[in-house]
Amino acid sequence: MIDHVRPAQLSAWFATAPEGSQPLVLDVREPWELQTASVRAEGFELVAIPMGELPARLAELDAALQAQRPIACLCHHGARSLRVAAFLQHNGFERLANITGGIEAWSHENDPAVPRY
């Protein structure tokens, strides 16, 4: 199942993870988008892999070892990240969330210093 989590709810969603599993925010935006606006990793690991590169780089996330690791996918508004979450689910990942509203909502709800574009 893919959860839909607003940026303001992300910490609470991460808190439901099994003890000892480090939460991950997977930013699937393009490099130019990352240069425009990025989030700070606070209480989670941040990994950036553009959506189009994910199939070739899936081993970097290692589904066999991290099936229970909470992974929240992030993009600009939430459409690409939802597709990535579905792809990850198909590849054996279990604890998945789409950050609804993307980095745009992140700027509104978590950190107004993050530029909107």
Image: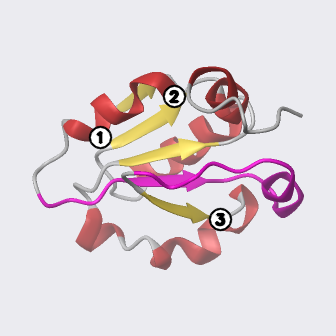
Query: With respect to residue 116, does 72 lie above or below?
Result: below
Q: Give the range drawn in magenta.
A: 20-42
7 in the magenta segment: no
Q: Identify the coloring.
A: secondary structure
Name the residue at 63% across, 48% down: 39
Marks 1 and 2, how far apart in space? 11 Å
Residue 83: percent from the left, percent from the top?
61, 40
| Of callouts 1 and 2, the N-terminal one | 2
Would residue 2 appear left or right of 50 to someone viewing this image? left
Of label 3 and label 2, which has the lower sequence position? 2
Question: Which residue position holds label 1?
Answer: 14
Give coordinates of residue 89: x percent, y percent: 40, 48
Q: What residue type is labelled 2?
A: Pro
Q: Nearer the viewer, mark 3 or mark 1?
A: 1
Amino acid residing under circle 3: Ile
Q: Is mark 3 on a helix, strand or loop?
A: loop
Q: Which labelled disc corresponds to residue 7?
A: 2
Q: Which amino acid does label 1 sit on?
A: Phe
Separation of residues labelled 3 and 2 (CA atoms):
19 Å
